[in-house]
Amino acid sequence: MHNQHTSSPDIFDVSFEDYDEKVIAASHQLPILVDLWADWCMPCLVIAPKLKALIEEYEGRIRLAKLEVDAGENMRLAGKYKVRGFPTVILFINGEEKARFHGAKPLSFLREFVEDYVA
């Protein structure tokens, strides 16, 4: 699988199979953003580098899980969280959803979105 975000250890791909381990369980250690995206979705491609920049700014204090909705059974997670459009970004802390937004947003919005949650 082509991986365009190997440069940051805090950005990783996640799937239906390893979601509970890599997102829900891991969010007890650090806040985790889940980016539900698709490669046919232009706003998803627009926001991806901004999310990457955000994660790099926080230097290990928050992580980003990339969930490609069209891969395998991943769409079941989009259904579980009642996702209506892409990209949808959901913030998890201690195994629970704390906040979400959808659509492409500027980096300034992303900073404000996470600042109350990240130490």
Image: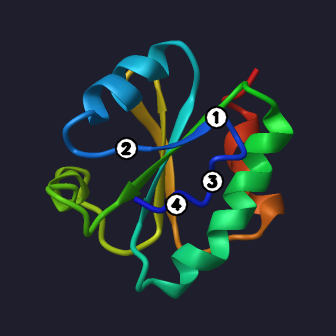
Q: How crowded is mark 3: few (under 14 residues within 10 Å), some or many (20 or more)?
A: some
Label of residue 5 in the image: 3
User: Of label 3 and label 4, which has the lower sequence position?
Assistant: 3
Q: Nearer the viewer, residue 75 or 113?
A: 75
**Residue at the (29%, 46%) spot, across then down:** 15
Q: Nearer the viewer, mark 4 or mark 2?
A: 2
Secondary structure at numbered mark 3? loop
- For badge 4, the amino acid type reads Phe
Label of residue 14 in the image: 2
The residue indicated by pointer 4 is 101
**Residue at the (76%, 20%) spot, across then down:** 119
Residue 63 point in image, percent of width and height? 60, 34
Residue 78 point in image, percent of width and height? 25, 58
User: Of label 1 and label 3, which has the lower sequence position?
Assistant: 3
Res. 19 image quadrant: top left
User: Of label 4 and label 2, which has the lower sequence position?
Assistant: 2
The residue indicated by pointer 1 is 10
| Disc 1 to disc 4, C-alpha distance | 20 Å
Q: Answer left or right for 82 relative to 85.
A: left
Image label count: 4
| Disc 3 to disc 4, C-alpha distance | 22 Å
Q: Which of marks 1 and 3 is in front?
A: 3
